[in-house]
Amino acid sequence: MSLLSKMAATRDGDIRSREKNLRLQEKRLKSLVDYARRNSPFYKNLYAGIGEEFKLADLPPVTKPQMMASFDDVLTDRNITMKKIGEFTSDLDNIGHKLNGRYLVFKTSGSTGVPAVILYDDDCIDVSSAVAAFRTFARKEDLRSFMKHGKKTAGVFADYGFYLACGMSRYLQLKMPRRNTKININVNAPEEEIISRLNEFQPAMLSGYPSNLALLAGFKELDIHPDIVITGGELLTDEIRSKLEKRFGCYVQTHYSCTEGGEIACECSEKHLHINEDWIIFEPVDKNNDPVPCGVMSDKVLITNLANRIQPFIRYELTDRVIVHDEKCKCGRTSYWVEVEGRTDDILELYGNVRIAPMSLYKILEEVPGISRFQLVQKASDRVELRLTAGDRQGSFEYARKALEDYFTESGVKDVSIIMSEDEPSADKVSGKFKHIFKEDNRNEEN
C-alpha cells in the first residue's frame, strides 16, 4: 500500500462500524502472521505447531526479554542484525536517518529494565503518519486554528538518543528541510533556554511530558499562545490538565502510545482514549494472559501492531494496567476506549525551592551505561538516593552521579548529595506500583 492508500484506508477508520474494523483486523492479522512465518525464523519456530486456520488466542504471547534475546531471528529482513544496528546507533548523527536506507531505528527501556530496539519500515511510518493526520486532534476547531496559524509545532522532549519522539521529529525535518514548522527542544536544557526558544518560535501546538509542561507553565517569562497542548509519555492528571488549560487558554489533550505499538489510542472530545482498532489489536489480560472483561483493571496488555512487518509485534506484552470500556461514546467514534494507569512519578522539590520534573531525571538515568533498572529517591531537600541494578554498580553510579550533578547545577540546584543505596529498586509494598522517581514521604500515599 502507498502512503495515499494508507491515508484513504485510515481516514474513516475511527467512525467505521466496529464489526467492519474487527473483520479488517482479522484479515490484517492473518496476512501479518503468514509474512512472519515465512520471513522470521523466530516466528516460524514459535508457530510451528499452529495450523493455517487459527484464532488470535492460539498464538503464544511474546515478551520484551524473549524478543530481545532472539532479536536477529525476529527480524524479517535477514540482512539486518543487532551488530549492524549497534554500529549505526553509535553515531548520533544517524538519528532520523534510515538504516540501509530502509528502516528507522528507535531505542527504549522501561520499568521492566530490559532495553528494546525497535525498527520501523515504510509501512509502519506511513500508518503512523496517517493516524496522526486524521486522529491527533480531539476537536475540529483546534485543528482549524492550528492550520490557520501555520502548523507550527514545538515539542519539549528528550532531544538526544534514538527515542521515538526525537527520531521521528528529526526524520520529518530531514524529509522536509524547507518547512520551518517543527522544532524539538531538549527537555533537559536550562529552563531559560527552553522558554527563550518557545517565545521566539511561538508554536501553534505545544507538546511535551505533562510534569515538565506543568513546571514551565509556572514561569511568567513564558509568553506563548498555542492553539492546543498535546501531552504524552506520562499520565495527564486532571490537575495538570486544568492547570495547563488555565495557563495557556487553550484545549489540552493527551494520547496513548508506545514505540512498539505506535499510536495505540487517540483522545476524543469526551476525553476518552479510543483504541485505533483498525491498526492495532489490544488485549487486556490477567497475569496468566487470560482475557479481562471490559470494566475490569487488567494486569497487563498484549498488543499486535498490524502495520510493522520488519519486526512483527504479535501479542507482545506491555506491563501497562488498563481498563477497557465498551460503552458507546458521545463523540461518534466506534472503537472501544481505554483508561491507562500511567506513570505517576513525583516532582522533586530540592534545596532552594527548585522543582524538578521526573521525566527529565528519568531520561538522564535511562542513558547511563550498564544500568538495567533504577530508582531515584528524594530523602530530603538536599539529599537523593540512587537505587540501581547494574553489572558494575560503582562504575554506573559514578557515571549517573556526574550526569545528575551537571543537570542539577544547570537547574540552579546546589549542595545536593547523591548517594548510592544498598537497596535494590522495588515496587511499593502496598500498591505494587513501581516508581522510578519519587519523594520518600509520598511513597505510601498512592490510591
Image: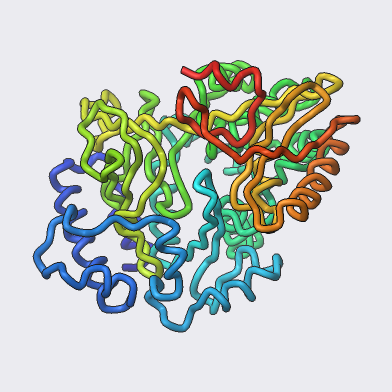
Compared to residue 260, the image places residue 351 above or below, namely above
Q: Residue furthest right?
A: 415
- Judging depth in this view, the residue of 105 and 295 nearest the camera is 295
- Judging depth in this view, the residue of 50 and 158 nearest the camera is 50
Residue at figure coordinates x 68%, y 31% from the top left: 377
Report which quarter residue 38 is drawn in.
bottom left
User: Position of 407 compared to 109: left or right?
Assistant: right
Q: Is residue 86 visible?
A: yes
Quarter of the image with the N terminus is bottom left
Where in the figure is residue 68, as x and y percent of width and height? 46, 64
Compared to residue 289, the image places residue 210 above or below, namely above
User: Position of 300 compared to 95: left or right?
Assistant: left
Compared to residue 425, the image places residue 82 above or below, namely below
Report which quarter residue 135 is drawn in.
top left
User: Position of 345 compared to 140: left or right?
Assistant: right
Where in the figure is residue 368, as x and y percent of width and height? 70, 53
Residue at figure coordinates x 45%, y 37% from the top left: 255
Q: Residue furthest left?
A: 53
- Judging depth in this view, the residue of 436 and 247 nearest the camera is 436
